[in-house]
Amino acid sequence: MSDLVDWGLARRIACLGLSDGPAAMGSAPDLAAAGARAELAVLDYTGLTPTEPLPAPEWISRADWVEANLASMAEVTTIVAARFGESPGPAPLRAVAARVLGAEAGALLGFASRHVLGQYEYPLLGGDRPPRLVFLGENIESAAGRLDADPGALLDWIALHETTHSVHFASAPWLRGHIGGLARKLLAESPARLPAGELLERGRRLAADPRRAIAEIRESDPVSLLAPAESVATINSIQAAMASIEGYAEHVMDAAGGALGPALPAMRERLDRRRRERSMPVRLLSWLFGLELKLRQYEQGKRFCDEVAAASGIGSLNAAWAGPQTLPEPAELAAPTAWLARVVPAAAAA
């Protein structure tokens, strides 16, 4: 493991205040049954055909979720270390930098571990580690209390979203390699530090047109704002791909949720309200850690998927998953008819 990050410190910070609560929900809903119901509903609506086994759903504690994601982050830093050298700079400076990065990683994972409800987890940069379908019982019970929702119904809703990802990636296995390839490309493009001249230019743009600069900040995140110019196109491609994937899951949740009972459609309004009503400190932390962007990906991607499916059916929407060339381009997410004209011209002309 690379010494770029103090992973021991990251683990300690991430686990600060985490309870020793059980991984499963106290009310003990049948997770296997919830997963089976979700899988049937997703397959029935989407018509997708998985070409590899689907991971079995499993309960996971907050601490176990931290460990799994520490491993994923360590995989990324190994690539960074290979590019910039395993031990750049004097030893004292390396130690300080490793502790700073460890503190940042720990803060991110500690914050997220209290909010994530479920996750289709896979090795971002490839590898032999199989995908997992995990659910955080403690967080789901906590969310059910805040939403005044039935815990079993909320579990069904979360299972529907995460199982859509599971079916989706198993039906288009190239997606994992494509996302991983874009991530590797971004790492290869990123310099060790942003050139001073580029930072000054961004400062001048802020002073010259503060309204536009503020709009850019609101629509972005620290990673994008501080990225070098040569990385912007790759970041846009990654965000467009993730918006499409997350939007597809959101669309399927609405379209297939009715098959699981009358409580699920009402869950959408409650979850959307929860997203809107987060406190300002939580919003700020979400923005700093890039989580705010993921919420916008849900919204933008869902609008795209809803409009394509309404105009031309789920079969046309599934054409997006034929290969990298059929994914919506960043500009097409706001113009579904343009994507239809490019990828499914017969449907666009109908």
Image: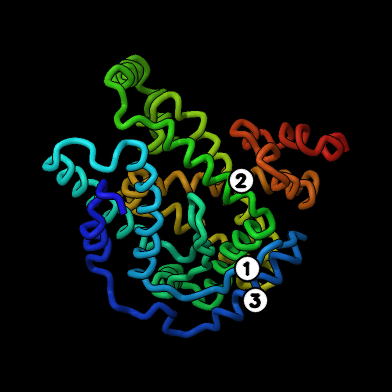
Q: Amino acid at mark 3?
A: Ala
Mark sitting earlier along the chain (3/1)? 3
Q: Across the whole image, how many numbered discs are drawn on residues? A: 3
Name the element at disc 2.
helix
Name the element at disc 1.
loop
Q: Residues within 10 Å of mark 1 (few under 14, many from 20)?
A: some
Q: Residue at x 58, y 69 (%)?
A: 55
Task: Report which residue position mark 2 lands on.
Answer: 244
Q: CA distance from mark 1 to mark 2?
A: 21 Å
User: Is 123 displayed left or right of 339 in the figure?
Assistant: left
Q: CA distance from mark 3 to mark 1?
A: 11 Å
Name the element at disc 3.
helix
Q: Amino acid at mark 1?
A: Leu
User: Residues at badges 1 and 2 in contact (C-beta under 8 Å)?
Assistant: no
Q: Residue at x 64, y 54 (%)?
A: 173
Look at the image and tell me in which quarter the C terminus lies.
Answer: top right
Label at residue 54 = 1
Q: Amino acid at mark 2?
A: Ser
Front residue of 185/262: it is 185
Task: Report which residue position mark 3 lands on.
Answer: 36
Q: Position of residue 213 (x, y in %)?
A: 38, 25
Query: Please, which colouring scheme is shown?
Result: rainbow
Q: Position of residue 73 (x, y in %)?
A: 37, 53
Front residue of 13/92: it is 92
Q: Residue at x 22, y 53 (%)?
A: 6
